[in-house]
Amino acid sequence: MFRSWYRRSFLAHWNTPVTNGMHALAFSVNVAAGVLNLVDRHWYTAMVNFLVGGAVIGMNIALGFSRRRLDRNLEAVRVRLLELQEDTNMSHEEKEIIDAKADRNLAAVIKSTGAEYINGRCVLRVRGIQFHIRSEDIIRINEQNQYDQTCYQSMPMPRAEKIASAILLLRRDPGLFDKWKNNHGKLFL
Amino acid sequence: MQVQLWNRQGDAPLLEYDPATADMVEVNRLVDELEVKHGARAFDKTTGEEVKEVTRQTQDVSLVRALAGG
């Protein structure tokens, strides 16, 4: 429980000017002290100083990754909330009609692009590359059987049409996969 | 014929035209405007190809909006 609270609280505050300043100060003081201790030949104390300095840097890198993961999750939640909010304004029948139409659109796209629907995911083959597309993520398997994965987001639309959009865009430009993978939150066509 | 945008409210037709009589230059201009407005590309659902120019033979034009990395 303490760990969870500490992580949440730290993630919320670690990237402020004050904490960044404190980290920079802690790093500088420890490195300076380490250098002075080296000059005075106090090897163990110098080692401790450098370790603490390294720990500050390592902590910042680790927290940076955590923060990015947290941002990604928050963005996914935000989009889902937006969808749910719109869903609540629709009757069940309206939603069924829209989803059925989206399924028909996906079926048409699968047929026209030569993709296949296998075990809950659409498999698209483009220039020797396989894309396994679900509504949450895309897996890429290249000719050397190397595996890569990315999440992707759309404006609010039925899941079937989100998959259909990814199929059409990837078929036209397989390089989009890398853009989506490396640029969280940025839109690409 | 319709040009549709995929969205959560159902695929609202943004543009309707009669391929037999419509001014295709005007149709293409409007489709270009819609692409810019919605940050989308026009695709033909029946061929799966991007629609660079709408002709009288083009069917089922759908505007596919940009997707974001995640």
Image: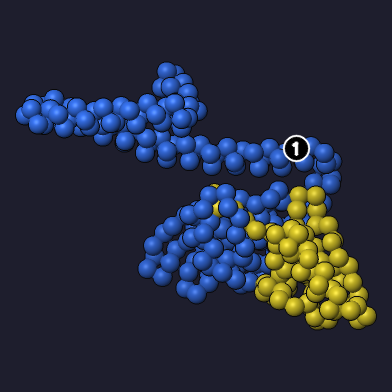
Chain colours: A blue, B yellow
Please indicate whether residue A85 sits to the left or right of residue A1 in the image: right
Mark 1: secondary structure? helix
Q: Give me the chain letter of mark 1.
A: A
> Which residue is identified by label 1?
A85
Q: Position of residue A132 (x, y in %)?
A: 53, 60
Picture quadrant where residue A24 is located: top left
Looking at the rendered structure, the kind of residue marked 1 is Gln
B49 up-or-down from A47: above or below: below
Q: Residue furthest left?
A: A41
Q: Position of residue A165 (x, y in %)?
A: 66, 61
In the image, what residue occupies the spot 67% across and 74% down?
B49
Q: Residue furthest right?
A: B21
Q: Residue furthest top?
A: A2
Please indicate whether residue A112 sits to the left or right of residue A21 in the image: right
In the image, what residue occupies the spot 42% across and 38% down?
A64
Instruction: Identify the image quadrant of the N terminus of chain B.
Output: bottom right
Q: Position of residue B5 (x, y in %)?
A: 77, 60
Q: Is residue A81 visible?
A: yes
**Mark 1 neighbour density, 10 Å: few (under 14) some (14–19) many (20 or more):** few
Picture quadrant where residue B44 is located: bottom right
Q: Position of residue B2 (x, y in %)?
A: 85, 68
